[in-house]
Amino acid sequence: MKKIAFFDFDGTITTNDTLFEFIKYQKGKTRFYIGFLVNVPVMAALRLKLVPNQFTKEKVLQYFFKGMQLSDFQQSCDLFIANKLPSIIRDDATVEIKKLQASDFEVVIVSASAENWIRKWSDKIGVQLIATKLEIAGDILTGKIAGKNCNGNEKAIRIKSAYDLSQYDEIYCYGDTSGDEAMLALATKAFFKPFR
């Protein structure tokens, strides 16, 4: 019997949005809040559904990271994983992942956050990762997303392109927002806000 479990990351496995947590860690709280104020108009437009999620996310990424060397960015990501990420991982989520692994489930994190500040952690706990990729030009971050933001329907598209779900007898999916609905719809057993 083949079994697989897909987990959203931000808000499901973590207590906070890791993009904002990473920006605070890398840039400091003062620069984070200044950047947040600068980007209030585009965030308000997103809330009013006047602009897509990817447009807003790229504006934030461009403000904070455009022009940064990939090696410097990745070093910051690795330090974030080592020093900050463990404090916002939900204990119940960790327990659930370990329980699934002990029951022979493949476990996959499917995240709209960039793979750069998740992969070392996901590798360490022995799970697969499908996540947003950042656009790099000549080892420099452009502040744009390579392809599509891994959110909403894109989560289901990425899962189906990586896994033949017809081969699995059990498919568990864990999420906490409307951005996870397409993924949750793939499940034989879905869990919404399971660790609250």
Image (spheres, rainbow, N blue to C red):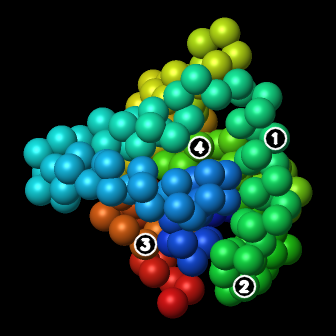
Quadrant holding the N terminus: bottom right
**Neighbourhood count class around disc 1 (C-alpha, 10 Å): few under 14, some 14–19, many 20 upward:** few
The residue to which callout 2 is attached is: 91
Q: Residue furthest bottom?
A: 196
**Which x, y percent locates residue 60?**
41, 43
**Which x, y percent locates residue 91?**
72, 85
Amino acid type at circle 2 is Asp
Amino acid type at circle 4 is Ala
Question: Looking at the image, can residue 127 be seen?
Answer: no
Residue 51 as seen in the image, left or right of residue 55 = left
Q: Secondary structure under badge 4?
A: strand
The residue to which callout 4 is attached is: 114
Residue 173 as seen in the image, left or right of residue 55 = right
The residue to which callout 3 is attached is: 176
Question: Looking at the image, can residue 87 be seen?
Answer: yes
**Neighbourhood count class around disc 3 (C-alpha, 10 Å): few under 14, some 14–19, many 20 upward:** many
CA distance for labels 2 and 3: 16 Å
The residue to which callout 1 is attached is: 75
CA distance for labels 3 and 1: 29 Å
